[in-house]
Amino acid sequence: MASSCKILILLQLFSIVLFFSQTHLLVTAAKDSGQANTNFVKTKCKITTYPSLCLKTLIPYASSVKANSTKLCKEALNVATKGARDASTIVLNLKKQKGITRSEAAAIKDCIEDVKDAVYELKRAVDAIGHLGDKDKAFQLANAKTYASAAITDADSCTDGLTDQAAKESSRPAAYTNFIKTKCNITTNPSLCVKTLMPYASTVKTNPRILCKEALKVAIKGARSASLIFWNLKKQDGISQYEAGAIRDCVEAVKTAVHELKQTVNTIGHLSGAEDKESQLHNAISYASSALTNAETCIDGFSESEEKVNPDVKKVIDKSITVIKTLASNALSLISDL
């Protein structure tokens, strides 16, 4: 199977996940139609991006939804979650096919991680929707939208990663490569910036926002790789109880950092044409800064009682966290320059 065909299949799969997340955001804003159960679903689906698909997947739940917008949102999110899981299974099987290159396998692996994160965010959105009857309804609704947006970002990361894989094989005009070199000069580590972002030159072109998003995605990938290293380290023989606890805390800190970086990606995506651009940019910088803080928290846990930590263990942790911090710092520099 040609590379472009495999990438197209995955793009089509995850467009379904994107659709349902977007559907959720739209239906929450609609007013109660007060019509019969099926007509209620039909009315709500008319304002979605893909009305026919909305009807096909949500009409079966009309009797349980009745004319309740909250229940309709929960069912849409549940269907999206199932769709994401099914897509993940298909992608796993695709990864096992013959003819998959090493770079394609890596892109698919990242995609699977993105989908896992999307499922997690969709579950959180369902939980938030379930608390709309609480006194803090506005807060819970804002959370639901945030989680659904995060799921969209995760799905976007997958499709963008696959698209980037195709772009890497295309030519890179000098204007694109020079743009990245110039932008990287303002970062804390220009050489690493150029090395990690140059493969995306054809995707970025000369768009500073896309460059920031790619820099953030590279940082997310680095954080995930570090987390895997930590888990493997924790399983090694000779790891003390104190070290195991510190590594576990470190994994949680990195997980939080990944969440903050994804929030930054989502916020950057809203900068174009936004009336509150300054506020959104401030939020993006805050999220990226929080990711750096969380990464530093990991190192602090090992530095507080160095006598209890094997120097070799600390060396592995320090090296991995330094990579995360450098990548996140580079992204933060690029964002601050927008």
Image (cartoon, rainbow, N blue to C red):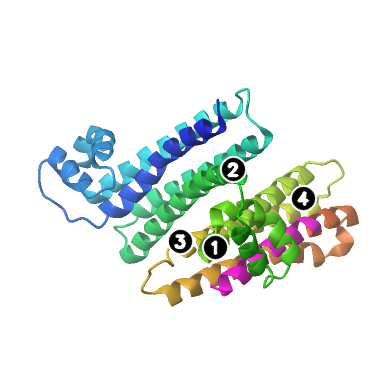
* Residue 282 drawn at (x, y percent): 50, 75
Q: Quadrant of residue 176?
A: bottom right
Viewer-closest of 115 and 97? 97
- Label 1 secondary element: loop
Instruction: Specify whether residue 253 is painted magenta.
Output: no
> Residue visible at 66% across and 55% down?
198
Main secondary structure along the magenta-highlighted residues: helix
Q: Which residue is mark 1?
A: 206
Q: CA distance from mark 2 to mark 3?
A: 21 Å
Q: Which residue is mark 3?
A: 269
Crowding near pointer 4: few (<14 within 10 Å), some, many (20+)? some
Crowding near pointer 3: few (<14 within 10 Å), some, many (20+)? some
Earlier residue among tags 3 and 1? 1
Q: Quadrant of residue 143?
A: bottom left
Q: Which residue is mark 4?
A: 244
Q: Which residue is mark 2?
A: 165
Viewer-closest of 318 and 178? 178
Quick check: can you spot residue 293?
no
Mark 4 or 3, which is nearer the eye?
A: 3
In the picture, which quadrant includes the N terminus? top right
Task: State which region is magenta.
Answer: 319-338
Viewer-closest of 138 and 202? 202
> Residue visible at 61% across and 25% down?
96
Earlier residue among tags 1 and 2? 2
Earlier residue among tags 4 and 2? 2
Looking at the picture, which amino acid does disc 1 mark? Thr
Earlier residue among tags 4 and 3? 4
The answer to whether 246 appears left or right of 202 in the picture is right
Q: CA distance from mark 1 to mark 4?
A: 45 Å
